[in-house]
Amino acid sequence: MKNHTLGTLTWIRMMRFTTQSNQLSNEFLKRFDLTTAQFDVLIQIKTYAPITQSQLAEKVTVTQGGMSRMLARLEKEGLIERKQNWKTKTILLTAKGEQILQAATPSQLHFQSSFFEDVLTEEEIKSLYTMMTKLEKHSRAKHLPPV
Amino acid sequence: MKNHTLGTLTWIRMMRFTTQSNQLSNEFLKRFDLTTAQFDVLIQIKTYAPITQSQLAEKVTVTQGGMSRMLARLEKEGLIERKQNWKTKTILLTAKGEQILQAATPSQLHFQSSFFEDVLTEEEIKSLYTMMTKLEKHSRAKHLPPV
DNA sequence: CACCATCACTTGCTTAATCAAGTGAAGAGT
DNA sequence: ACTCTTCACTTGATTAAGCAAGTGATGGTG
C-alpha cells in the first residue's frame, strides 16, 4: 500500500475547514436573512440570468429537488422570480433580490476571503486557487472505482 | 473595496469540491455500510480511544447533540461501545468495529487521496496540506466581525 | 389523430444535522 | 444534610438535502 496519508489528512482538514467556515458564514449572513447556500445561488443567478433551474442546480452541486425547494423559498421571500417560459422556468432576480445582494455582497466577499487572507500570502492564495480549480473540475468528472 | 474575488472564488471552489467529493465518498463507503462522517468518527475513536463524546464532537466539528445521535447509531450497529465511566461516557471500538474499520480503511484512504493524486504533484499536495493546516486551525479560532 | 417518450420541475418520504430545553449525577457552599 | 451549580449527555422540534415517484407540457411516431 502506497502512503496515502498525506492526501487523506489534507482531505480531512479541508472538510473540517469548509464545514467550520460555512457555519461561520451562515452566522454572518444571518444579518441579511440569508444562508450561504442562498447567497451562492443568488450570485449565480445574477451572473448567469436568465438561467434554468437545472443549470443552476448543476452549477451549485445540488439536486434538482433541492434547487426546486430553495428557489421556492427565495421566491416566497420575493428575492427571485420564476417565469414559465416555453417549457422551462427561467429565474430572475427581483429588485428586492438585487438590493439585498448589493447590500450583502461586499461584506460577504470580504468575510469569505478573510479566511484565506488572514493566514496565507498572496502567492499562496493564488496557488491554492489554481489547485482548487483543478481539483473541483476533476471531482466533477470522477466516478467510483469498481468493487 | 479591495479585490477579494480571488479568495471568494477559492472558497466557492473548495466548497463545491468538498460537497462533491464527500458525496462520492459516501457512495464509495456504502459497500461497507458506512457514511463518510461515520468513518471519520471511527478513525478518531481508534486513534484517541478512550475518548469522551464531547471531545469527539469537538474534533470532528459537530455539535454534541449530533454526536450523541451518531454514536447511538454506531452503537446500535455494534461498532462501538459506550461505557458510563465516572460521570463521563468513554467510547471504545468493538471487535466488529475494529474489523470493519480494518476492511474499509485502505481503500477509503486510497480513494480519498486519489482526489488529490489524480491531478496534483507530490509537491503541490504537500504545500496544499500545509495551507489547509493553517486554514483549519485559523478557522477554529475565528469569530464573527462586529455588525 | 392518438399514443408515447422526454424533459423540466415538484413533491412525499427519509435521513442527518442544528439548536435549545431537559435529565441526572457530582461536587461545592452553608 | 440540603440545596445549587455544573457538567456530560439526551431528546424534541425544526431545517435542509437526497432520492425517487409523480405531473404536465412538448414533440415525435405509427
Image: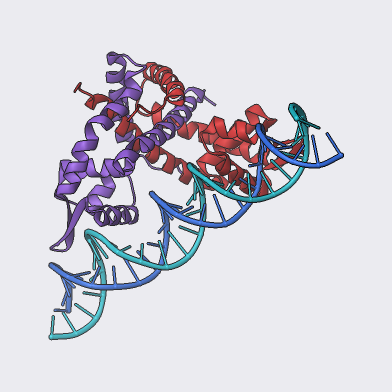
Chain colours: A red, B purple, C blue, D cyan
Q: In the image, D21: left or right of A119?
A: right
Q: In the image, A3: left or right of B8?
A: left
Q: Is residue B3 above or below residue B142?
A: above
| Image position, residue B65 (x, y; %) | 33, 56
Q: In the image, A132: left or right of A55?
A: left
Q: Residue at x 62, y 37 (%)?
A: A101
Quadrant of residue A133 in the image? top left
Q: In the image, B103: left or right of A28?
A: left
Q: Is residue D4 above or below residue B105?
A: below
Q: Residue at x 76, y 35 (%)?
A: A85
| Image position, residue B71 (x, y; %) | 27, 53
Q: Nearer the viewer, residue A88 or C30?
A: A88
Q: Nearer the viewer, residue A113 or B47?
A: B47
Q: Is residue B112 above or below residue A66?
A: above
| Image position, residue A93 (x, y; %) | 69, 37
Quadrant of residue B69 in the image? bottom left
For residue B73, say whether it is visible. Answer: yes
Q: Is residue B19 above or below residue B129?
A: below
